[in-house]
């Protein structure tokens, strides 16, 4: 195996997470609790066993096995919390695996964020050197590429201005320019493209394509399926810390997009209902799906048609009330809107709030009319909060549980295809009259 | 796990330049890991740039800039001279109080600023720890080395005072790098301990001022070491800063409190602090990015 770049075998990572403490309702509660736990600690200590780290371990990654050949561009996709970042962090040596190993052949450069090590008080010129060194470039290498970096960043005469005076666009351009000139055998990239304005993203993407075609090995993590599709030969889908599938990019993306069960069920536990050790979960999220006008689950829809988000959840505490909310993010990670099933916020009185929920399975439907959203990709986050009289209590939040892409099919075959900027594209009323004849 | 077999044939062959390839195995580290000195050398440029950055930003956006490195010890010495020299009239082994105190204050300031900045270096650079790899020990090391700049500036104050009080310099001054090195070792040793601890326990940051205050009064800075009974002095030198300060005084003023056994004790303590500090730091290093 002479052309191997990365070989990963049995790789796993455990984290210790702190056990959730019951809420301290009053100061007195906090004190008694502290007293009680310190008494327990003393008792244990007397018997000679100090309890180790309370809390449980979660397995962020388990049994990861794969190989990457030299010159290959591998895309890694998956939902938030599926272990993508942890995998990249292990491969770029920021954190250690708990089990298994990864063999890396050659120098690894990692770009887990744009502008690592930038210092606001330093000038653009100084930051190019500082950032370059942090990313693993030699000084001579930075000297050699300095002019190219400055040219790419287009910061020109601001080169000797402290970066704290830069606009955010200039800052990002400079940071990306340094990163783009990192010249290592293996490059690890995390979503760094999802920054900057449209124009700059296009330039970044072009630069990325150039990099991926230069024969270097690239590991590329992204939420933007489009960039994975255009840049990567192969892809890997991570789900709950495991490789769900791996293969050609289009196959893996299909698998990702068409698999309805995305990270659910997730459940909400409410503190105080029972002892902290065995908190009962009153709400359990069963599924979240996106439906086309015919009521069938779909991932690709026409932007002129209404889109319905269906949330199925189970209540096991009769008499509770809940607030169900969806939040949409666009493909650049910005919030687009949020909406909940409250009277004032819905059309047609389909709300359920303030009515006690019997125990059982519930289906909440949220219909987003056609001609509201743009022809881009959205992800859905679901939040279920317990209604506590005048505010919303402990919350279940399931991030990015569903995703869908809208298409402008009516314009697709016209040859003057225009790009509509922004996360929404509502149908607005226009009238253009001749005000005064010449 | 639904597997889609990777299409091996379709992976098009690209031009692969034949280069020497080093393999790096990333795996859970064994307990009792040694410090990888070769790696530190490999990352020397990162160390250089961290030091360079810290020096550049230290006095940015201050009107007086590097003059602060001179003004600070000068002001402290003025206060010490008034309080301890004029008012309390502490003995000084027959030296002018200002020179006497400054000879102690200079290495102390170097030691304490190195220590406290090294201790905060990991928490203060948490954005780097979670985003890029380099041997983490470079951060505290850089902070200790950066202190040399302030030290050199403050040295000018000392020379000015020596000229004013007509203290004639002697060849003993040439030995100053040795106590300075001792101070560096001690400062880095303790700094490594505290830096590694503070990743997990942020309490450390609040404890450092007290630690330094106690340490300062157990070091002969405002008072001469000759106040300590002679038979206790070797034990007294378990505090490495005792030897550092007395060595400075010997070089500058020619006082004769320092003995070989004191120097040896201090060197030993400093070495133990550094070795254990490095080991503890290495042991904790692998969890820094997860815990911070």
Image: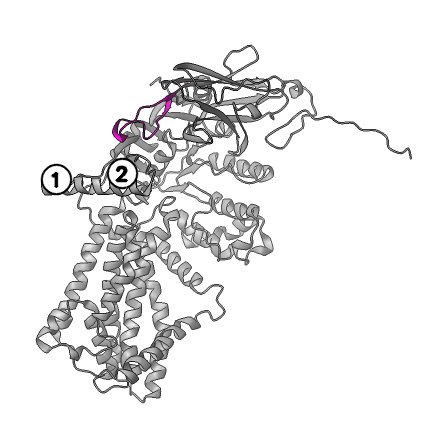
The quadrant in which residue A411 appears is top right
The image shows residue B17 at horizontal and vertical percentages of 40, 38
Q: Is residue B4 magenta?
A: no
Q: Which residue is mark 2?
A: B25
Say which element carries label 2. strand
Name the chain under label 1: A
**Most common SS among magenta residues:** loop
Name the residue nearer the viewer: B74 or A154: B74
Depicted A151 relative to depicted B249: above or below: above
> How many residues crowd mark 1 within 10 Å: few (<14), some (14–19), many (20+)?
few
Task: State the mark number for residue A337.
Answer: none
Name the chain under label 2: B
Residue in the image at 46% along x and 22% along y: A253
Residue A125 appearing in the image: yes
The image shows residue A248 at horizontal and vertical percentages of 43, 22
Q: Is residue B179 rendered to the left or right of residue A413?
A: left
The quadrant in which residue B50 appears is bottom left
């Amino acid at each position: 195996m002479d052309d191997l770049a990365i070989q990963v075998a049995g790789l796993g990572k455990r984290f210790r997470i702190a056990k959730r403490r019951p809420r301290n309702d009053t100061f007195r509660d906090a004190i008694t609790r502290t007293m009680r736990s310190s008494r327990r600690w003393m008792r244990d200590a007397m018997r000679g066993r100090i309890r180790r780290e309370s809390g449980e371990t979660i397995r962020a990654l388990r049994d990861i096995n794969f190989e990457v050949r030299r010159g290959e561009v591998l895309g890694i996709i998956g939902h938030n919390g599926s272990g993508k970042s942890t995998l990249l962090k292990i491969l770029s040596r920021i954190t250690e695996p708990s089990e298994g190993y990864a063999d890396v052949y050659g120098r690894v450069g990692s770009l887990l964020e744009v502008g690592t090590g930038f210092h606001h008080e330093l000038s653009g010129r100084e930051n190019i050197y500082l950032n370059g060194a942090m990313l693993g470039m030699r000084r001579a290498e930075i000297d050699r590429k300095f002019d190219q970096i400055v040219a790419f960043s287009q910061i020109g005469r601001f080169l000797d201005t402290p970066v704290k005076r830069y606009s955010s666009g200039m800052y990002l351009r400079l940071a990306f320019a340094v990163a783009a000139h990192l010249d290592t055998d293996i490059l690890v990239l995390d979503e760094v493209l999802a920054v900057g304005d449209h124009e700059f993203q296009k330039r970044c993407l072009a630069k990325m394509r150039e990099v991926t075609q230069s024969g270097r090995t690239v590991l590329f993590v992204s939420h933007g399926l489009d960039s994975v599709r255009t840049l990567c030969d192969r892809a890997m889908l991570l789900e709950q810390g495991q490789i769900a599938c791996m293969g050609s990019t289009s196959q893996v993306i299909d698998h990702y997009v068409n698999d309805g069960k995305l990270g659910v069920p997730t459940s909400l536990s409410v503190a105080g209902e029972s002892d902290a050790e065995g908190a009962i979960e009153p709400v359990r999220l069963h599924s979240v799906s996106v439906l086309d006008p015919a009521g069938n689950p779909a991932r690709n829809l026409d932007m002129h048609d209404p889109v319905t988000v269906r949330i199925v959840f189970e209540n096991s505490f009769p008499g509770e009330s809940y607030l169900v909310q969806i939040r949409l993010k666009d493909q650049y990670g910005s919030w687009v809107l949020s909406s909940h099933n409250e009277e004032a916020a819905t059309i047609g009185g389909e709300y359920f709030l303030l009515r006690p929920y019997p125990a059982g399975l519930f289906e909440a439907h949220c219909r987003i009319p056609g001609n509201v959203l743009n022809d881009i990709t959205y992800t859905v986050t679901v939040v279920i909060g317990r209604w506590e009289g005048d505010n919303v209590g402990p919350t279940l939040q399931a991030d990015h549980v569903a995703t869908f892409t809208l298409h402008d099919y009516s314009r697709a075959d016209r040859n003057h295809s225009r790009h509509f900027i922004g996360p929404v594209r509502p149908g607005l009323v226009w009238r253009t009259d001749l005000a005064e004849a010449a | 796990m639904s597997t889609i077999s990777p299409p091996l044939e379709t992976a098009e062959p690209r031009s692969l330049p034949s280069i020497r390839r080093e393999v790096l195995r990333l795996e859970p580290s064994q307990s009792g890991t040694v410090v990888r000195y070769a790696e530190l050398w490999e990352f020397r440029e990162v160390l250089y740039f961290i030091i360079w950055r810290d020096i550049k930003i230290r006095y940015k956006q201050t009107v007086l800039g590097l003059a602060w490195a001179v003004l600070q010890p000068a002001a402290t010495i003025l206060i010490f001279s008034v309080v301890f020299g004029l008012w309390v009239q502490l003995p000084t082994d027959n030296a002018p109080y200002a020179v006497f105190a400054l000879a102690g204050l200079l290495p102390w300031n170097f030691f304490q600023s190195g220590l406290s900045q090294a201790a905060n270096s990991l928490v203060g650079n948490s954005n780097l720890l979670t985003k890029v790899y380099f041997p983490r020990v470079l951060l505290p090391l850089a902070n200790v080395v950066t202190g040399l700049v302030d030290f050199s500036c403050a040295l000018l104050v000392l020379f000015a005072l020596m000229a004013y009080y007509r203290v004639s310099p002697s060849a003993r001054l040439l030995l100053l790098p040795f106590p300075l090195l001792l101070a560096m070792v001690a400062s880095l040793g303790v700094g490594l301990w505290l830096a590694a601890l503070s990743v997990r326990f942020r309490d450390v940051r609040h404890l450092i001022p007290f630690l330094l205050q106690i340490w300062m009064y157990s070091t002969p800075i405002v008072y001469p070491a000759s106040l300590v009974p002679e038979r206790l002095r070797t034990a007294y030198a378990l505090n490495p800063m005792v030897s550092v300060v007395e060595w400075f005084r010997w070089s500058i003023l020619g006082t004769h409190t320092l003995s070989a056994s004191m120097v040896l004790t201090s060197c030993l303590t400093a070495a133990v602090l550094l070795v254990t500090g490095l080991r503890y730091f290495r042991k904790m290093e692998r969890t820094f990015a997860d815990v911070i």
